[in-house]
Image (cartoon, helix red, strand yellow):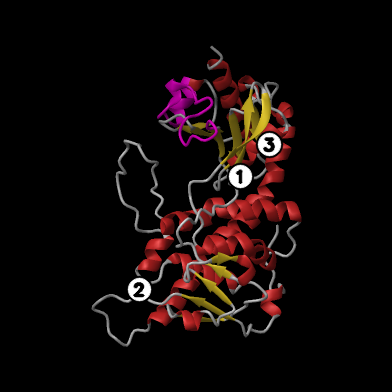
Amino acid sequence: MTSSSSSSPTSTNPPSDKIIATHSGTFQADEALGVWLLRQTSTYFQSKVVRTRDEAKYSKADIVIDVGGVYDHATKKYDHHQRGYEERFDDKVKKVVEGGEVEEKSTPRVTKLSASGLVYRHYGREVIQNIYPTLNEKELDLVYTKMYNSFMEAIDANDTGVEPLPKGCDIELQYKDSTGLSSRVSRLNPRWNDDEEISPDDRFEDASAMCGSDFMSVLSSTVESFLPARSFVEQALIKRFETDASGQIIKLESGGLPWKGHLYDLEKEYKIVNEKDLIKYVLYTDQAMMWRIQAVTVEGQAFENRLSLPEHWRGVRDADLEKIAGIKGCTFCHAAGFIGGNKSYDGVLQMARVALGENKD
C-alpha cells in the first residue's frame, strides 16, 4: 500500500516568505482551495495570504489568484473572471469500442477552470507528488486526472456557473444538495447579523483548511485504495477462465475493493470487447465473510446491468431462495437483481453459473 510521507519536501521546508494574494470580501471554495493547494508546494509552503481587492496591494504579492482579471502563468496570475476566458482542463479521454476495436475518444469539457482549477493545472502534480513521493510517473498521471474528475471539476463547475443538468434537459432535480464542499465553505462566511468582532480572514483560513481536508480525503482514497485495487482486478480478469469456463465470471481475492472503473478499463486493455465475452458477474466476500455475487453494470450507467440475476430470485431470501434456485446456502437476492449472497464460494459460483445459463436465451 502506498501511503503519504511525512518526509515530503513541504513537510521539511520552513514556511515560505512568499506572499499569496486573493480577493477580500465573501469567499468561496474556489480561492480557499487554491490557497491550500499552493501552500502544499515547496515554493509557497505555508505562505502568508493577503486578501484585498486593492491592485496596489495585490500586485506586490508573489502570486495572485481569483482577482485581477489576468491569467498568465509566467507572471503568476491566475484569475478567470476576464472577458473571453475559455480555459478548460484536458479533454476527457475515454476508451470506447467501435466496430469491435478499442479506440480513444476525446470529449471537450463543458466546465471552465476556476482559479483553483488553474492552480491545479500548474501545481497539482507537485502537490500530489509531495504528499505521495513514491508514485511513479504513470501513477501520478492517473491520480492527477482522477482527482480532477472526481473532486476539482465540481469546484470549478460550481464557481463558474455550470448547471448539474445540461441545457435543454427536461428533467427537474428532485432535491437540492447543500452538503457539498462549496456550500459548507459558503456557510463559513460571517453572516449579516454576526458579531462584528468575527474576523473574515480567520474564517477564510478555516475554509481553506476545510477544503484541504476534503482534498486529502479524496486523494488518500484514490492513492491508497483505488490504485492498489487495479492489480487485484487485473489478476482476477487474467484468471477468469480458471474461475469458470465461460470467462464471464471473476473472483476477487479481497472483498470491498473498488473494482468497477478498473474492470471497464482492463477489459479494453485486454481486448475483451464483444458483448458475449464481457464480465457479467463479480464474486467477492463482504465484511461478514459471506460471499456475494454482483452484476456488472453497463459502462456509464448506474443501474442498468449487463446481465441481472434471474427475475424469479429477486426479493427472495434464505430457505425460500435455496428452493427456488436449487442451490444450497443462498442468503438473499436483491429485489433489483443486481446483487445476491451465499454462505460459500461454491454456492455463489453456482449462482453465477445458473444465472448465466438462465439468461442465455
Q: Nearer the viewer, residue 58 or 89?
A: 58
The residue that label 1 is drawn on is 255
Which region of the structure is painted magenta? 297-324
| Membership of 5 in magenta stretch | no
Of residues 172 and 107, the one drawn nearer to the viewer in this rendering:
107
Q: Earlier in the sequence, mark 3 or mark 1?
A: 1
On the rendered structure, is 332 left or right of 18?
A: left
353 relative to 85, above or below: above
Q: Which residue is mark 2?
A: 189
Q: Given the image, on which type of amino acid does mark 1 rest?
A: Gly
Up-down relation of residue 180 to residue 7 (above or below): above
Q: Position of residue 35 (x, y in %)?
A: 53, 72
Q: How many marks?
A: 3
Q: State the image coordinates of residue 159 (x, y, percent, origin top left).
A: 42, 59
Q: Residue furthest left?
A: 193
Tell which tag, 3 or 1, sits nearer the viewer.
3
